[in-house]
Image (spheres, rainbow, N blue to C red):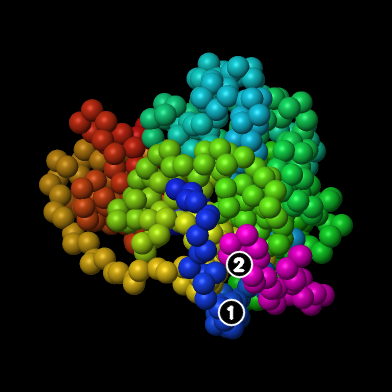
Amino acid sequence: MFKNYTFLYLSICLLSISQPSFAQQKTINFSGLEATVNEELKATNIPGAAVAVVIGDRVVFAKGFGVSDIETGTPVNPDTLFRIASTTKMLTAAAAVALAQQGKLELNAPIGKYLPLSPKLASVTMNQLLSHTAGIRDGASFNGPHDDSALANFVRSWADDYLVAEPGEIFSYSNLGYVLAARVLEEVIGKPFADVMNDVLFRPLGMRRTTLRPIMAMTYPLAQGHDILSGQTNPTIVRPFADDSRYWANGGVFTSVLDFARFAIAIVNRGKIEGQQALSPTVIAKLSTPYVDTPGGNADERPRYAYGLNVRDYRGVRVLQHGGLRVGFGSLVRMVPEYHFAVIVLTNKSNGLLLKTLEKATELAVPLQPKTTSPPREPIAMSEAEMRSYVGIYQNAPDYLRLELVVKDGRLFLRQSGQSEMSQVVKVGDKIFNAAGQEFLLIQGTGKAKYMHLAAHALRKM
């Protein structure tokens, strides 16, 4: 069976706040939420979590569950710092938009205006980087350098082969796109990226303990990252602590649910916190405006991407959300501006997502429509000629996002390029296919497939 790539991505309009929200008009009993968290922690073997719920302009629920460190047994509390992985992206994007609002950055200007880069890379814009439409391939690293200079040195080595698609051509989730955006912010401000984030976003929002630097995070109550090693059943602490400063912009923020709640309050209240305008309403609007449709997913939910935020029409409401997975940690954030609601869920285990907790908190505070179930997709017959038109190698990142479609015995199969193990491909819709439970799209070029779109990544046919 081919490698499941869903871990690479979680697809997981601001209105007037003059009217009280649905949740503000009723008393919420959070005992059911607490029970859900505890049950889900046990079911997923996650050592600890912190959960916060925002309604209106304040935190109405914040609690730690389990332990921050299985060796010491230290309890999690709402001030405990977690690394939030890709949920970082909305914060990086917010800083970029805030700088643009201050006139220090043009979101639609070629970034070659700010950085010396190879010709095609120089032509992309911050708008494209933040919305994952720059065409830059994906990449990830959890162990590497820790110094501020590493980001500039890394980007300096890039060439046009970092592009898998023409800028603006297609949505393709890219951690490296946010790496490049961070380098632009450094150049514009003349400070290391971690300092830019502190000056432009964390300090103005009062996120006093939020940081990108591990040596700062460790001076506060800090959750250790945990993982379950091969052959084991219980989580152990990840050693050494996974860190690579080149990738801080796409997944490196340390924060607590109480600190992050301040950002969420600003999002659902048009930039205001405690009666003060911490961020411009224009910044909030630009940050949360959808810029591109994301291929695949539930068509009824109209999945789109803003800046560091997935936008969905979910059970009758418009939600902004993102999740994050990295070595040792997982995170989920959902915000519903129409009802001035947000929920933040942070965990300390690799791939640790409390999806039922996210859902329970939303159901308690937002008037969602009943759940609906889509009928299963029926297989659609493919001719031999059609199958052969899809055959080829599709690549995003040469080291791990490289797949191959082959025809054997009159059937279409998907496999990791260069490997023998295969999964049969079934056509289930117009350009929609399924292999071992993983749906993907084949997007046409001139008469033939040009891209495979899988788990939010565009893989170009080589």
Figure check: 280 above or below 297: above
Quarter of the image that includes the N terminus: bottom left
Give the residue at mark 1: 30
Element type where label 1 sits in the image: loop
Residue at 35%, 45% in the rendered image: 295
The answer to whether 20 is drawn above or below residue 304 in the figure is below
Magenta span main SS: strand
Which type of secondary structure does the marked residue at label 2 adopt?
strand
Residue 417 is left or right of residue 348, and the answer is: left
Residue of label 2: 53
Q: How far across and down, in percent of the image, does residue 315 sit?
A: 37, 64
- Residue 330's label in the rendered image is none
Distance, label 1 to label 2, CA atoms, is: 10 Å
Q: Position of residue 383 (x, y in %)?
A: 12, 47
Q: Residue drawn at (58%, 79%), measured in percent from left and top?
A: 30
Q: Earlier in the sequence, mark 1 or mark 2?
A: 1
